[in-house]
Image: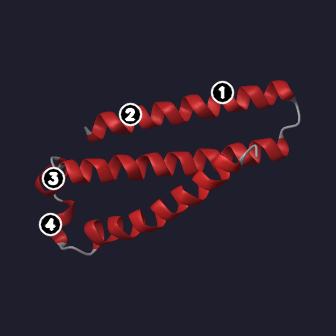
Amino acid sequence: MKGVLQWALQRITGLILFFGLIVHFYVMHYSGSSALEYEEIARRLSSPFWKGFDILFLGSILYHGFNGLWGIAIEYIHSRKLLKIAHTLIVLLAAGLLATGVMVIV
């Protein structure tokens, strides 16, 4: 059963990314020329719904991408020590990016 949770979360975040990307493209690229103006983005970011959407989207992007990177590391790194270093770097980088992103959104 090891790895089942990561497998399931990879699929779930993939679905979130698919639908989130559709929403993102519609809102940012097809809802008018004012969608990219500062005032419109500030108004959107003041809404709890959009804050939640952006944090969920960001978390999904980071988990999906870094979990995929971890899968690649497992396949190609055979040294336990290097694998532990890679894991630590992946977790720290993902956590740092998530913290930075949440600070920007909130």
Question: Picture coordinates of residue 65 (x, y %)?
Answer: 58, 50
Q: Give the image location of residue 66, x and y in percent.
A: 60, 44
Residue 68 location (% of width, % of height): 66, 50
Residue beneath label 2, please? 100
User: As shown in the figure, which amino acid type bears the numbered disc 2?
Assistant: Thr
Q: Is 89 rendered above or below residue 73?
A: above
Mark 1: amino acid? Thr
In space, the residues marked 2 and 1 are separated at their CA atoms by 18 Å
Amino acid found under the numbered disc labelled 3: Tyr
Q: Secondary structure at mark 4?
A: helix
Q: Name the residue tied to disc 1.
A: 88
From the top left corner, tell me how far across and down residue 43 is, in percent.
Answer: 12, 52
Residue occupied by mark 3 = 38
Of mark 4 and mark 2, the one earlier in the sequence is 4
Q: CA distance from mark 4 to mark 1?
A: 42 Å
Front position in the image: 30 or 6: 6
* Residue density around tag 1, few if under 14, some if 14–19, many if 20 or more, within 10 Å: few
Mark 1 element type:
helix
Sequence-earlier tag: 3 or 1: 3
